[in-house]
Amino acid sequence: MSSPIDGFALSDESAAALASHVDMIRFADQLPTLIEKCRASVNSPFMPLVLSKPDNRQRSLSFRHFVTDVLTAVSFKGSLQAQQELHLLAPISTFIETHENENKRLTQTKKVRASPSGKSIANATDQKLAEATAIYRAIRRHLWRHRLCAHRACARFAMKSLWWDLEGAKTDAFCPTAVAFMRWRMHWEGRRVPSRLAERPERTAVAYGLLGWISMSAPIPSVYWSKNFEAWLNASLLAAACFDSFRAWEQRCVLDLRKGKIAWNFRDHDNYARRHWACSGRGTSFEPGLLFLEPFLGATSQFPEPEPFNRAHYLRSRQIIDLLKR
């Protein structure tokens, strides 16, 4: 089946994609009006309300439903009673600054802000990168200790043995938990050689995956946000992105094990859908900051069960890795 448009024939998939794109354009045109109505309902005409960009890996319907749920929940001021009675989408986290910091921040926002210089922008980016690196390392330690567990032996041997650039290669599959951790780290740290993961981290090394997240996925701060509020939001969204991406890598590596082959493509992480998010408020006691995150759908909300670890599993993984050595 195909749909003719101006003399051209589109496949069903192309026609569906085009229709979804048109629907998203129409919805984007309606967004300013919907947001203004939401602000009017809570009597806060200048309330910041920041939405993530729609992910083109998902259907536009997912983004529209999420935004509609967020605007409805914000209109009820995040009331727990309303959430329970109307089954509204609940914020995953709430930020309220202390009274002292709140007064200081409100005084500062009344001042006219000068245009930031190139040096101040660079310093702000360096600070964000330092904060993101600390969060990432904490999550990396958590996954290493509590998710890999005994599979750390498989990961250590693989990271020690695979010393060359695997980009574009196809190899036999081995321990999916170890491979998922390696590919997750390669994704966030911008590395292409697994053995570099086993080296002592260099102070001057730039984690290009984190830098890419700051450049493309971190929220653009509102002038009404304090530095603490912005840091809280960045930390929450980065942590969610790290855990979500590890879950996606685990699912991918389990499928690779069933197929028996791993295709090492550095850009594979671009194919994973990201959850949409939204944030409202200024982080004050009168207008708390509410962070909404799109729920997982179906089975994707669960981490895959790791393959049982025993000596036979470890020896089998070592044998496969030894055969890959150059």
Image (cartoon, rainbow, N blue to C red):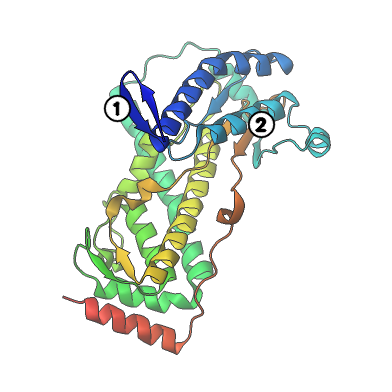
Q: Does 160 sit left or right of 219 as displayed?
A: left
Image quadrant of residue 99?
top right
Report helix, strand or loop for mark 1: helix
Q: Label 2 to label 1, Cα distance in Å?
A: 40 Å
Q: Is residue 155 above or below residue 34?
A: below
Residue 4: where, in percent of width, then height? Answer: 37, 24
Q: Label 2, secondary structure: give it.
A: helix
Q: Residue at x 50, y 24 (%)?
A: 23
Q: Are marks 2 and 1 in contact (CB under 8 Å)?
A: no
Identify the mark nearer the N-term, 2 or 1. 2
Disc number at residue 69? 2
Q: Residues within 10 Å of mark 1 (few under 14, many from 20)?
A: few
Residue at 35% in and 60% down: 183
Task: Decide if residue 298 is on the left or right side of residue 252.
Answer: right
Q: Is residue 160 above or below residue 230?
A: below
Residue drawn at 56 percent across, 18 percent down: 31
Q: Label 1 sits on what residue type? A: Lys
Task: Provide residue 285's location: percent of width, then percent of height.
Answer: 71, 28
Identify residue for label 1.
119
Name the residue nearer the viewer: 216 or 27: 27
Check the picture and name the quadrant holding the C terminus. Answer: bottom left
